[in-house]
Image (tube, rainbow, N blue to C red):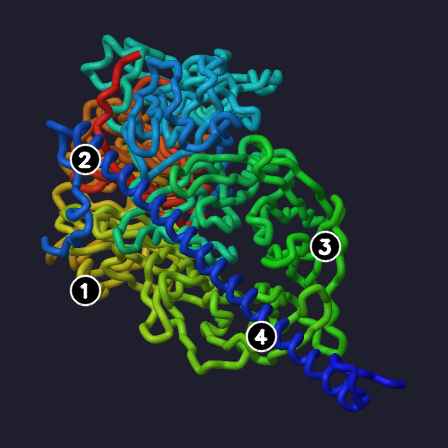
Amino acid sequence: MRIEGENGAPVSPGSSAASNSSADEMIENENQSLRDRVADLEKKVHEQTDEIMCLRSTLADVLRRISTIEGARALANNHAGGRATPTKDTVRLRHNNSDSARDVSKRASSYLPGRSPSSTQIRGAHEASKPFNSSPHLRVTFSRRGVHYQSTSSLYSDGHSSSSVSPAPSPSPTQANNPHPVHTARHTTPSPSPFASPARPHQLGVLNKRWASTSDFATPAHHQYHHLAPSPTPTNSQLARAKEAQYNGEEGIVKMYLRGRPINLYVPTPMRETYVPNGPSSSPPAKLKLEWVYGYRGRDCRNNVYQLPTGEIVYFVAAVVVLYNVEDQMQRHYLGHTDDIKCLAVHPNKLLIATGQTAGHDRRDARPHIRVWDSVSLNTLHVIGISDIERSVACLAFSKADGGSLLVAVDEAPDHNMSVWDWSRGERGYKLLETKCSADQVLAVDFSPVDRSTIITCGKNHISFWNYESGMLAKRMGVFENRERPKYVTSISFTDTGNVISGDSNGNLLIWQRGGNTVYKMVRGAHDGPVFSILVQKDGGIITGGKDGRIVEWDRDLERTGNVIEIPEQYGSPRVVTSGRGSQLVVGTTRNCVLGGTFTFPLRPVMQGHTEELWALAPHPGHHQFLTAGYDRTCYLWDTMAHTIVWSKDIGEHAQSAAFSNNGEIVIIGTTSGRWFVMDSETREMYSQHQDGNEPIQVLKFSPNGQYLAVGSRDNNIYIYQVSEDCRKYTRVGRCQGHSSFVTHLDWSADSQFLQTNSGDYELLFWNAGLCRQIAQTSQMRDVEWATQSCTLTFATLGIWPEGTDGTDINTCAKANQMDLLATGDDFGKIKLFASPACQQRARCLEYGGHSSHVTAVGFLQDDSRMISTGGRDTAVMQWVVSSNSSSSHR
């Protein structure tokens, strides 16, 4: 064969082959150059995407700060002429010190589901400036963020607020024809939501209006009422009403009934002529606003701490999502949920957040669902799965490859159903499909960042690879081949190439290649015990956290870099590890702590909390501080201005009660074993310990003159001690015997001579404290002035009991020190404020949510500037600002 060149000269075959090889090399070089250029362009696109996200987040932070400043100005204007509100600088100051579970099992909180906005209420912020119909119940504030409604008929704080925001409810009937709805940050005028559930049996017929009075029945719900569902048609059993209180004017006795049991209460002499049990009651003279939440839920939840680009750390505890700016020492709160929050997911745009909750004790009142909300305005955008999720939302994840248009959720029901949602379609979202995920527990779910159709789930005895195509989900189980199959696959994450990294209960790390379901690489013994968290950083580096208390850094090939953090045992093991600013890490732990730090600088606590049921609360008598203690055997002294822990003390026993001496130098801790400790409130030195029976010490209280200590026990007795040597020595005077059930509450008279006590069987008894004798002639006690009001069954608290209540429903009661204000906490996670005395049956009240378990204690600081509440099993401590209620009026 003859081969010729361009000039017609013959060319040898060898020369032709060399020429072809050279051409192939040139093409390959060009292809490689093209691939490099494409890679560079992709890198620049990612960098620009990060810059755009940062700019958006910065803008959001600026808007939030502007709103905060405007709120502060408005609040300052509202408080003009009244008690001064601490400024931001004041709040940062830290004050130095100078001068048994009940017989009835406590229920988890059963909230009524919060309102969700209509689709017209979730438009962009630019629509908020359109014309609107005015309403007499709304105050409108114009700002750079648009127009904001503030309803004067909300059950929550009526003032301007940017830190504690409830979800935007559906429009009221008066707004139904308004073509230009406006965003609402907290205070709106809602109508009954389509998501609202029937009320509890004893709540049926309650008039849904501003002051939550329970004296009117079978009245249609008013749309102005906030966060309460309309009452359904009651059944015959639900129409059975408790007996009304009966008043005998001649003897001055009012008889109330709890569960059919009569309780005689003596009316004070000045009120005998005019008292009417069902007469009009006064409105509370003050209102509350949630200022700070202490605690975090890490003991049994995963992947629930994230740092937003704005600098805020987002996490949850009880029914509150906290957005905490550590640098500015400010918290904001999303209050849309009605019961325990179990999971959290952040949208790829870093501005939207999805949170899922569990079902309440009474599932009609608090059904499980998912809420998608805006982290800047705290407006609820969508409420998803209100009728689809059976038990609780176990885990959540937004899709990533398509910009977050899908949301996947796993139910904790026996079949662990997994559902995929087009979450932005309509108010309730649109469920694309649902399938049984696993018969065993599911711990995590996530979308692939590169394959839109790939979903990974893991949990007990499985890791599953799902492919979503044409409305169908195809499932492939992970194949471990000849490797040891773990009992739990405890964590998953994705590399930037789409490979899956999993951690298991054996402490191993496995890499699963993109698109496959077989193990590509395995690292044995990455941790000594389960791997709780896997973080893949932007540079491809990997950080893992395990039950062994270690945080380990790896390169992209899963080779150790040598950087390791050992978390102190007191903080627990790292449950979740996430990226903070720069090289910082944010860590949530199994002992309900949030830590921050780097591999170079040690981790420090950002937030700490109790880990087990919480009962003891004692406000300091002289400083802005309070003490809490619980079944985790730990006492904390908190500073309400600095929002920090002053000190902590492990007492070695379950704590049930606590009390400060009148000078604040001594604190008494009562335990569940009948033992109580005398401790220095500054040095934490234990001076002595005493034993009164073998049952829990339910209540401790010093007399107003400081000479006596009353110890109420679950063994039905009250022990009286004489106090001497600056409250360091205690000598028993005697024992008050007479109750037929355990002591729940007690109060001293103002002159320190008498006691009034309540018990578990609804008794109200009076005692001569010095003689330790019961006063049989209770009519003689009608005009006694009481130093405190912690007893829930007295004439002054007759009105705090709602219709059809159980005598154990209200756990705690406290009167403000300088205001005629009474606060209660109940089994349903609610805090209520009443005017004091609340002596009219079913008195008016303001109601507040946030706790997801029974509220075990409430208490006011010494200057009444703040109120503290503690939750039982939710382990949350909440700090509320008390402000005067200028809109108080009589019915």
Sequence-earlier tag: 2 or 4: 4
Query: Which comes before the other along the chain, label 3 or label 4?
Result: 3
Eye-nearest disc, 1 or 4 = 4
329 left or right of 132 in image: left
Q: Decide which of 87, 774 is in the foreground and name it.
A: 87
Q: Which mark is residue 256?
A: none
Q: Position of residue 848 (x, y in %)?
A: 37, 32
Compared to residue 95, the image places residue 72 above or below, namely: above
Residue with the mark numbered 4: 507
Contact between labelled residues 4 and 2, with CB atoms less than 8 Å apart: no
| Label tally | 4
- The residue labelled by disc 3 is 467
**Please, is residue 834 above or below residue 599 in the view?**
above
Kind of residue indicated by mark 3: Asn
Q: CA distance from mark 1 to mark 4?
A: 42 Å
SS type, badge 4: loop
**Cα–Cα span, label 1 and label 3:** 60 Å
Q: Which residue is mark 2?
A: 817
Q: Given the image, on which type of amino acid does mark 4 rest?
A: Gly
Instruction: Measure the alpha-carbon separation of dots 2 and 4.
Output: 55 Å
| Cα–Cα span, label 2 and label 1 | 27 Å
Query: Which quarter of the rendering shows the C terminus?
Result: top left
